Amino acid sequence: MKKRINVALIGNPNTGKSSVFNLLTGLQQKTGNYPGITVEKKEGVCRLSKGLSAKVFDLPGTYSLNASSLDENVVIELLLNRKHEDYPDVAVIVADIENLKRNLLLFTQIKDLAIPSILVVNMSDRMRRKGITLDLAGMEKALNTKIVLTSTLRKEGIDQLKSHIADFAHLETSPCVDFRTTDPEYFAALQQTFPNQSIYKLWLVITQDVNFANINRNTIQKTNGDHTRSNSFLKRLQQRETIKRYQFINEVLKKHLHVNQSEATDFQSRLDRILTHKFWGYIIFFIILFTIFQAIYDWSSYPMDAIDSAFVSMSEWTKTNLPSWFLPKLISEGVIPGLGGVAIFIPQIAILFVFISILEETGYMSRVVFLMDRVLRKFGLSGKSVVPLISGTACAIPAIMATRNIESWKERLITILVTPFTTCSARLPVYLILIALVIPDTRFLGANMQGLVLMGLYLLGFGMALAAAYVLQFVLKLPYKSAFVVEMPNYRIPILRNVGITVYNKTKSFVFEAGKIILAISVLLWVLASNGPGSSFGNAEEIVRQDTTLLNQAELEQKISAYKLEHSYLGRAGKFIEPAIAPLGYDWKIGIAIVSSFAAREVFVGTLATIYNVGTDEEDTIKNRMADEVHPDGKPVFTLASGMSLMIFYAFAMQCMSTLAIVRKETNSWRWPTIQLVVMTVIAYLAAFATFQLL
Amino acid sequence: MTLAQLNKGEKAVIEDLNTDEVPLKLIEMGCLPGNHIELLQLAPFKDPLYLNVNGAQVAIRRETAYHIQVKKTNA
């Protein structure tokens, strides 16, 4: 029978843990979320030998077992709970050769948990260049473990790692540091109260309030040993524990690791002097940002056009080749245009994720955090808000999840609340189509007018996010305690495989998540548009024929379908809200699109596509169809004023159910998403009103 | 003197720190009494500080640096 074991990859951030994971599992991996929380869960399968395979978990990066964030909590809860179905048979601790000292802190803690463990020392390819030599046998003995040197860049050491994992039954489980010596009396008393429990686990429960084996901080508090003491006492003891561990690590490394200093880090510091320079650092950052946005538009226009026309011809083909009854019609007029509305994002999202993951992989993102922290603090944000604000230009969902490493709750909450103002890619199709319709394709001061408007909308999004943050820092009465610590990893050449896998996974989850909603809404809309209450919908043809003197057959058919739409369920809903949106310059058809896109912005274009498509046999692309759209009095619907007003509305309105859901999860209350929804919608309405009235 | 008084490029040894104010994460990176520290870079307005602590490179805010006592070393 085939046997499968659990392997957990644990390590500090920036050690190449995910590269090791990618090499172990290849593309046989899946990402999901841990139940109930939004921490990303990555698991994959690795074949170790005949009849033995491993389920490998890539746990969130952590500096120690003293959790300071949700991500780190996941690691501890898993490692403390022997009954957890994912509880590891082997813990693989990934360290990198240049930061071995710091990485070993976590290693000594894991050893205290008595899990069979292997130490992976990654990036061995850098050893010669940095003048590092390592006495492997001596280290293994001192640390009580098996050590594997790996280079994920050169794919070295992975086979050896696999064979050590396969031999898991013979791995050492005894600890290498006795942390109890930091306060022997305290720990002896604690052990006496719980004679059958691991003392280190008890200590972890006391210091961070996690559960294990039915013991939590409360049960310990209720015993009469005064084990929980004061926070100050605990923190001092934690510090002593950390010092103790470092003393041990320093001794081990002094004996077994040798660094020839003269060959060290010259290039690194020279690069830092430029990239974090008071003046040039900012210039370089803005050039990089500018390049990214340029690339997103330039590179994506061809694949986007291709996707657009592919869906048009698919819809065309199904219409001509399939019989004309309910289901095929639903597919050609509801499903296909709806899917096209999602697929068209793929190029832009993928390109943006490529850049973001390259910036993260190279270590540059931390420098940006360093540069921007002081500036953003003026707005009640943190330097670490940069990553969410930039990621927000792809999608607010991963962006809000990226706020987790912001230590101050106030700064984090403000970042979460304002991120949806940044121009996410779901707004893009709305902007692109409206710009093409109402902004002339002329040159202004040598630059393309349409491009300038688009850039203006991006700046408007960032500006609004900052302005809202500025106000919020005074409105929110929250205690502020800073614990800002950001590691500045060594610069690295990004590993393309890692970038590729990240981009693939993120794009895939976006498409499926957004796709489900958009598809459902498209189908619903089509059904509502093709059916109507009462006799005016059913007898549309006769009513129009009676009412008109038109002779032309084509014109007559168009009139009939327009009449049908107006009297369908969807049309009635749009008519119902028309008085509310007329001051903004919209007609009832746009009203339908706005209503439907309260679930997801990108539905807007798809909805208009569906609405205008209903009953029309000719397949124009959506844009041409919109340009022909006129009010009953013959004036065009999409003018400069109404188009701009619509864009402003989309810039500020909170129209994304997935974002509201994620904000609910991350803030653990309905209060914040509700406030977000109401305030943003009000701002959007007023701003759009002002725009239409002024233009 | 405190870490906040160090100039760019200067090195020091950590003497003491206020554990109630200094984040544990920084301590775990090796910001502990007896360890060496070097101020590598300062952002505009001298905040945040980019440090090399015990071989680890890390950035912290000025308000945290006030709570770390150091003694300047030469070279």
Image (cartoon, coloured by chain):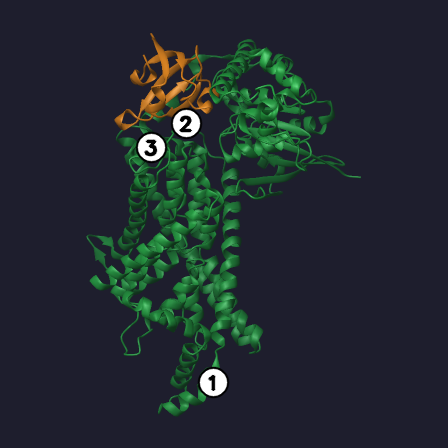
Chain colours: A green, B orange
Same-chain status of marks 1 and 3: yes
Nearest the eye: A453 or B5: B5
Circles 1 and 3: CB atoms closer than 8 Å: no
Q: Secondary structure at mark 3?
A: helix
In the rendered image, residue A237, in percent from the top left (x then y), is placed at 51, 16
Q: CA distance from mark 1 to mark 3?
A: 64 Å
Regarding residue A695, the answer to whether it shows in the image is no
Tag 1 residue:
A535
Q: Which mark is residue A485?
A: 2
Q: Chain of mark 1?
A: A
CA separation in Å, label 2 and label 3: 11 Å
- Residue type, mark 2 in image: Val
- Res A306 label: none
Front disc: 1 or 2: 1
Q: Disc 1 or 2, which lies upstream in sequence? A: 2
Name the side, left or right, on which A405 lies relative to A448: right
Residue A71 pos. (x, y %)? 52, 35
Q: Amino acid at mark 1?
A: Ser
Whether A68 is drawn above or below A385: the answer is above
* Residue type at the position of mark 3: Asp
Sooner in the amino-acid sequence: mark 2 or mark 3: 3
Q: Tell me, yes or no, if residue A581 can be seen here.
A: yes
| In-image side of A224 versus A610 (left or right) | right
